[in-house]
Image: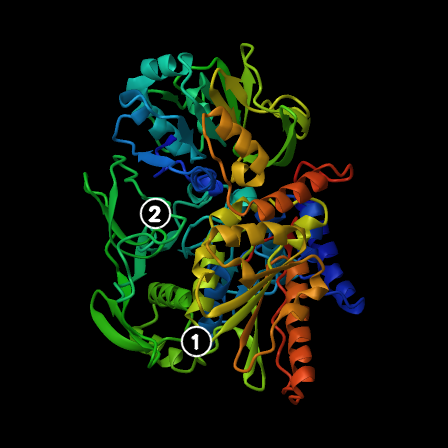
């Protein structure tokens, strides 16, 4: 199995890279390549990448990533259509949306052509017809409990943004409790278009959800998957699922 | 509005003796009252002529205390918030104390530790003449997002007239507010510096001007060090004032400025505090004190040689260590400091945020940014973790390569200290978080552990030690002082 991490030098906030470390440790023979900003992504040049991963980044670095991916936009679109597998966590997937509209001030100091300070709008790659709304003075911190098929998925959101789908793109997770992609309670979380999977959940999603990771890796074509420390991982997972199912637990922080 | 302000001022002032009479120690309460009655209280309350602010992610409390202490040695009694919080209620309480009921200011100088996240509430009204920015690094994911966001907040709200005292070794903060007058401090290359980053947090890998890779000439930890761009002219600024020849054996260093070089005492042997001391010296020079005067006063400061509060039980020691739960960057520094200490160690970790646990569930993403790998050394013999979150810490430590047999998880807090092995010469570290619940629990358990060791080994009770000060004013489970 070959995994490409896109731009690990900037897309590495909130412990997100632990996802790939856990996948690596669980998948014998797994090869991970990190592609930096000044290199064309391997999934576009080598054709043997099983999973493209990108994690959370700063608002300025979203623009940096967009600028560096812009030349490959059409190739990326074709790769998605032909079934290339992606996993995006946190705000990474916003890069592939239509635009980011700031409801508060723009928290950025980079103003290439794609950024309009007057309308407080950032043009993204436009691969998915989704509008992102960002309010940097109103951070959303929440817990999340959802379903991936029959599996319980637990996680955390710590974000300034929410996203509104302008076309019907299926959700990645069916929400049991907590805010969905559009911030509303109970709506679907993330998107899944063909094999492009994205979620606003931040941090070590795979570590928090060992059963989800195993199923995800099987879907990626992984074989002989043996997560290390499975007993400890399952104990932490089961405890958190039980905790998140308590009716009296507040989901929104503050 | 002025009428409302004076009502707020009088009622808030009346609350001070009322708190004393009723035996309460809520130092922020008067400020909260004032803000409740008059949300613009900070705008109208009179302020000292000279305001010195200290902000940044880590080290601001220590630095502010150093500034207050040194100015006192120069005969300057400052208005300060050292006994209250560093958010708007604490600043309001401090400023309230500085005026009489006619809103006439009693102090000439204020030293205010200011929470960097509260910039929007503070800086429109409190305009510092000088501001030390200790550093900007990752902190609470929930509260502070990431350091670039905090820099943006400061750049948006800090007045253009404020003279900045900036850490040249921290590229995250040193180029903030480029049009403000500034002076740089730093610590010159140390023998222990490396080029490669050995920490999980490595926030400045690319040039902010051209996106090419930064090349580090040396690093202390994470992105702290000196770097330059491999493509353009971007790089760390030169020091105006720096610490060199750092000699912990003899607790001295060479302080260099544009036209002097002098040997000074290191006043606290925790390395991060040398940054704070260097920032202090740089500020004092900006305030017009001469190097000779400063050296003279610095010589009267008692040198702190104990890294952590501890209690001796025969050949054993019980340390109580304030960690920085939710703050991966600072917590990693704590682990480095512990591992650097001589001798075998057992750790009991109460770093779960109990403030959050009371009504929420802690977002544990931060532990995957924290260098638990540092704890994977032979000298650490056992680590005890507790509670629901203890399962998460246990898993994180296993990922860090710490042998399973060294990690003990117990659900009940009170069972944790029972797990230690009583071994001669052992050093026991009780770690706890900065939220008041965890803080109180950690201190209580450290005392209980020492008592248990004394009982089992029949060692005599120690001379009573001063208890560490309880941190003030949490913000919904999160502690904002650092």
Count neighbours of disc 1 (C-alpha within 10 A) and say few if under 14, some if 14 to 19, many if 20 or more.
few
Q: Secondary structure at mark 1?
A: loop
Which residue is denoted by mark 2 in the rendering?
Answer: B180
Q: Is residue B124 visible?
A: no
Specify the subunit that label 2 lies on.
B
Apparent side of residue A136 relative to residue B450 in the rendered image (left or right): left
Q: Secondary structure at mark 2?
A: loop
Count neighbours of disc 2 (C-alpha within 10 A) and say few if under 14, some if 14 to 19, many if 20 or more.
some
Of residues B294 and B109, the one drawn nearer to the viewer in this rendering: B294
Which residue is denoted by mark 1 in the rendering?
Answer: B342
Apparent side of residue B153 relative to residue B262 in the rendered image (left or right): right
Quarter residue B30 falls in: bottom right
Of residues A102 and B206, the one drawn nearer to the viewer in this rendering: B206
Q: Against A157, is B304 above or below?
A: below
- Extreme residue in the front direction: A224
Quarter residue A24 falls in: top left
């Amino acid at each position: 199995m070959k995994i490409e991490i896109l731009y690990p030098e900037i897309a590495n906030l909130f412990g997100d890279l632990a996802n790939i470390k856990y996948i690596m440790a669980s998948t014998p023979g797994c090869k991970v390549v990190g592609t930096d900003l000044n290199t064309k992504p391997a999934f576009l040049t080598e054709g043997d990448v099983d999973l493209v991963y990108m994690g959370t980044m700063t608002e300025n670095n979203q623009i940096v990533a967009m600028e560096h991916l812009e030349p490959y936009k059409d190739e990326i679109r074709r790769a998605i259509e032909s079934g290339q597998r992606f996993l995006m966590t946190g705000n990474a997937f916003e890069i592939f949306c239509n635009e980011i509209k700031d409801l508060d001030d723009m928290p950025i100091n980079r103003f290439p052509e794609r950024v309009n300070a007057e309308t407080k709008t950032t043009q993204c790659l436009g691969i998915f017809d989704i509008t992102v709304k960002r309010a940097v003075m109103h951070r959303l911190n929440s817990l999340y409990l959802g379903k991936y098929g029959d599996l319980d998925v637990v996680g955390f959101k710590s974000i300034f943004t929410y996203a509104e789908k302008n076309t019907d793109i299926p959700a990645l997770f069916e929400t049991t409790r907590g805010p969905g992609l559009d911030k509303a309670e109970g709506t679907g979380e993330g998107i899944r278009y063909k094999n492009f999977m994205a979620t606003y959940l931040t941090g070590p999603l795979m570590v928090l959800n060992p059963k989800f990771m195993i199923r995800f890796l099987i879907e990626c074509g992984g074989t002989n998957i043996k997560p290390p420390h499975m007993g400890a991982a399952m104990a932490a997972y089961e405890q958190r699922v039980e905790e998140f199912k308590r009716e009296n637990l507040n989901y929104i922080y503050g | 509005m002025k009428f409302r302000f004076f009502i707020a001022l009088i009622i808030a002032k009346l609350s001070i003796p009322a708190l004393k009479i009723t035996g309460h120690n809520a130092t922020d309460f008067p400020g909260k009252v004032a803000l409740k009655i008059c949300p613009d209280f900070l705008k109208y309350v009179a302020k000292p002529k000279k305001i010195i602010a200290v902000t940044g992610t880590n080290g601001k409390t220590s630095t502010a205390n150093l500034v207050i202490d040194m100015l006192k040695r120069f005969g300057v009694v400052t208005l300060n918030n050292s006994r209250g919080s560093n958010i708007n209620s604490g600043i309001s309480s401090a400023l309230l104390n500085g005026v009489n009921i006619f809103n006439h200011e009693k102090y000439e100088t204020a030293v205010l530790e200011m929470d960097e996240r509260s910039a929007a509430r503070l800086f429109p009204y409190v305009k510092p003449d000088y501001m030390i920015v200790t550093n900007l690094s990752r902190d609470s994911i929930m509260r502070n997002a990431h350091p670039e966001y905090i820099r943006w907040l400061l750049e948006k709200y800090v007045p253009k007239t404020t003279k900045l005292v900036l850490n040249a070794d921290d590229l995250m903060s040193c180029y903030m507010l480029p049009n403000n007058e500034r002076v740089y401090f730093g610590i010159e290359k140390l023998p222990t510096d490396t080029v490669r980053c050995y920490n999980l947090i490595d926030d400045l890998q690319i040039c902010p001007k051209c996106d090419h890779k930064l090349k580090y000439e040396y690093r202390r930890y994470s992105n702290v060090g000196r770097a330059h761009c491999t493509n353009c002219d971007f790089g760390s600024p030169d020091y105006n004032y720096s610490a060199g020849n750092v000699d912990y054996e003899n607790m001295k260093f060479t302080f260099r400025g544009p036209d002097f070089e002098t040997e000074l005492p290191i006043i606290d042997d925790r390395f991060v505090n040398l940054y704070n001391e260097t920032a202090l010296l740089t500020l004092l020079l900006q305030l017009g004190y001469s190097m000779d005067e400063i050296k003279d006063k610095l010589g009267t400061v008692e040198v702190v040689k104990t890294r952590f509060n501890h209690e001796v039980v025969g050949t054993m020691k019980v340390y109580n260590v304030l960690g920085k739960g939710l703050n991966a960057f600072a917590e990693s520094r704590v682990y480095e400091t512990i591992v650097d200490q001589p001798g075998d160690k057992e750790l009991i970790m109460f770093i779960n945020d109990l403030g959050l646990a009371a009504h929420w569930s802690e977002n544990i993403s931060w532990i995957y940014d924290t260098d638990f790998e540092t704890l994977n050394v032979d000298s650490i013999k056992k680590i005890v973790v507790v509670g629901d979150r203890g399962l998460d810490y246990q898993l994180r430590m296993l990922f860090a390569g710490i042998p399973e047999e060294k990690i003990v998880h117990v659900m009940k807090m009170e069972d944790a200290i029972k797990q230690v092995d009583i071994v001669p010469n052992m050093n026991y570290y009780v770690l706890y978080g900065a939220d008041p619940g965890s803080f109180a629990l950690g201190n209580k358990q450290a005392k209980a552990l020492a008592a248990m060791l004394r009982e089992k080994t029949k060692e005599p009770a120690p001379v009573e030690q001063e208890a560490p000060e309880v941190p003030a004013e949490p913000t919904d489970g999160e502690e904002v002082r650092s």
